[in-house]
Image (cartoon, rainbow, N blue to C red):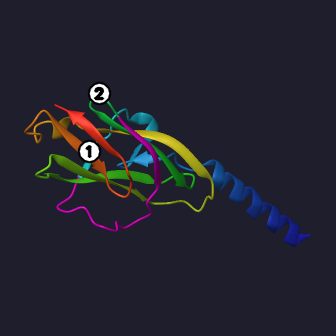
Amino acid sequence: MRFIKTSLFFLILSCQGFSQQKELQVNGIPVSNITCADIKVTKAIPEISQGFISDIRDAQIIGDCLELTVVYGGCNGNLELMTDSVVTKNSQLNFKLRWIEPSLCKALILTKVAFDLKPYKELIKEKSATIKIMGTTFELYYNN
């Protein structure tokens, strides 16, 4: 009887833990509070980034925001979009998505997140640049 009570207690505690999962975050901010998130600038974009990488299913530029449709495994976590802010000689800006702080939940979640491209307008010397999302085949054109 004591075993059943103890097991029931842990089952209720486990269910409560799953119901209190944090929502997905972008740069440490809940995704529901963001319309167009900041892009993290690093000295160099690592070939293999630390953390878990999610799968980008679609990418498009809407106004000055880069909108990504992302599938990730887990019930929460934190996404970051990284760049080195270097415009290559062929007018290309490179970006890489990183998913950190994964949960133990095995759900596959599809969501859209947007990142602010406005700070990169000044870097574009010509009228447009190619936005390359590393690890994908997505190359988008961003007009100044």
Residue 116 lies in magenta, yes or no?
Answer: no
On the rendered image, what quadrant is the N terminus found in?
bottom right
Q: Is residue 111 above or below residue 87?
A: above
Q: Name the residue carrying label 2.
A: 63
Say which quarter of the image contains residue 101: bottom left
Residue 53 lies in magenta, yes or no?
Answer: yes
Q: Name the residue carrying label 1.
A: 131
Range covered by the magenta-colored residues:
41-60
On the rendered image, what quadrant is the C terminus found in?
top left
Decide which of 128, 62 is in the foreground and name it: 128
Q: Magenta stretch: dominant SS? A: loop
Q: Is residue 50 left or right of residue 94?
A: right
Where is residue 87 shown, x and y percent of the image?
Answer: 14, 49
Q: Secondary structure at mark 1?
A: strand
- For the residues labelled 1 and 2, the Cα–Cα distance comes to 14 Å
Residue extending furthest front? 90
Residue extending furthest right? 1
Circle nearer the viewer, 1 or 2: 1
The residue at 86%/72% (across/down) is: 3
Q: Residues within 10 Å of mark 2 (few under 14, many from 20)?
A: few
Residue extending furthest left? 125
